[in-house]
Image (cartoon, rainbow, N blue to C red):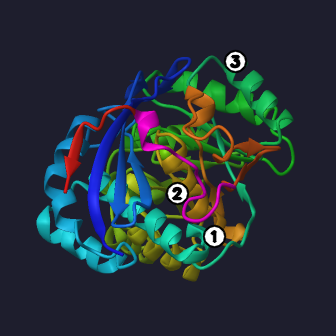
Amino acid sequence: MHIREIHVYTAPLGAKKTYNMSNSTVETPVSTIVAAIDAEGLVGYGEACLASPQFQPAHNGGVRASLDVLAPAILGHDPKHVTTINASMNRALTGHTEGKAALDIACWDLAGKQLGISVVDLLGGAQMNDVTTYHVVGISTPDEAAETATRLQDEGITRLQLKAGGRPIHEDIASIHAVAGVLRPGTDLAVDTNRGWSTAEAVHVSQACSNIAMSMEQPCATEAELAQVKLQVGHPIIVDESSTDVRSIARMISSGLADGFGLKLTRLGGLTPMRAVRDLCMATRTPMSADDAWGGDIIAAAGVALGATLDPQFSRGAWLAHPYHDTHYDEANGPRIVDGFATLPTGGPGLGLVLDRAQFGDPVAVYR
Ligand SMILES: [Mg+2]
């Protein structure tokens, strides 16, 4: 059953309290929601929401503009044909993976609904029903960071991501030591700088924290800088912002630069390219996460679906934005964090969400 219409909606997802990364603060990102509708009226949903204009080379207005080119390129396609749909989008527009991700995810959701099965099953089946998740400790004072880390561990979270960068590194080093001081056995610590340190700063921090078991996530801006740092530090390097496509990820695995990846659905272009990366990472025993930098229940459901199919040994978890903005599109069925794990949505086939297009108001664009 072919895609007959695509409707586009927006939803503001304001941070409920200050959420700082090294290079930006999350304020009120406006999410782009796409609804792909087939001839029988079944609807598949996709979403893309960029946390800030500085986090990546894209912004939410650009996502919506890209749909003017991308949506017409997939009208009339069978949503089950995600390979040909992605080829069609790539022929129509270079780059703009965020808009492609929203449409690709909508196709997986619609295909699942047409077939009466979950996206998790379409992706090959779950290896985890309770999906590993991780939680962020934002940039704050050492005492506040330690307090947050303690509270999160009390809630069952076993993977902590401490934000760093954008301030004098002695403050970052103090926060790392403070959080390390309250870590419990079995809790994993990643220090995520979101590209914020110079190579010299990254090496300095690693040396000042040499007795702390932690990984360093995207400490510097570019792949070349990460390669330089990798030779000088004892901590594992996790690549996030520099992992832009299957080719760059394959290169960083084979060169030994990357000890793991933080992967974003919108940066890679949706579940179809993420499935390829998952298979590559699992075959090479490379840990990865599957999520996005912001967004609502739709992108969260897609991240958790992919996350459920990972080998637990090599899962870095799926992050959910909703604890930071408290907005739910599907109160009853959306993915939630329970006892430190993300639950899979329970609302039926596809992504497992029960949504009504009317809940998002009038469409901002309609393609037919
Ligand atoms: Mg990151």
Q: Are marks 3 and 2 in contact (CB under 8 Å)?
A: no
Instruction: Check residue 144 in the rendering and tell me which mark sits there, or answer none.
Output: 3
Determine which residue is flagged by label 2: 302
Using the rendered view, name the quadrant where residue 197 is placed: top left
Seen from this angle, which residue lies furthest front?
40
Q: Nearer the viewer, residue 72 or 217?
A: 72
Instruction: Check residue 310 in the rendering and tell me which mark sits there, or answer none.
Output: 1
Number of residues whose C-alpha sits closer than 10 Å to that of mark 3, classed few (under 14), some (14–19) or many (20 or more): some
Using the rendered view, name the quadrant where residue 132 is placed: bottom right
Quarter occupied by the N terminus: bottom left
In the rendered view, does 289 fall on the left or right side of 9?
right
- Answer whether residue 226 is magenta in the image: no
Q: Are marks 1 and 3 in contact (CB under 8 Å)?
A: no
**Which type of secondary structure does the marked residue at label 1 adopt?**
loop
Number of residues whose C-alpha sits closer than 10 Å to that of mark 1, classed few (under 14), some (14–19) or many (20 or more): many
For the point 26% across and 58% down, the residue is 5
Location of residue 24 with respect to 153 vertically, above or below: above
Q: Magenta residues, as a range?
A: 346-360
In the rendered view, does 269 fall on the left or right side of 92?
right
Q: Nearer the viewer, residue 190 or 27?
A: 27
For the point 51% across and 79% down, the residue is 279
State the separation of the CA atoms marked 3 and 2.
32 Å
Residue kind at label 3, given as amino acid type: Glu
Location of residue 145 with respect to 350 vertically, above or below: above
Residue 73 location, x and y as percent?
17, 65
Residue kind at label 2, given as amino acid type: Ala
Can residue 123 be seen in the rendering of this structure?
no
Q: Nearer the viewer, residue 199 or 331?
A: 331
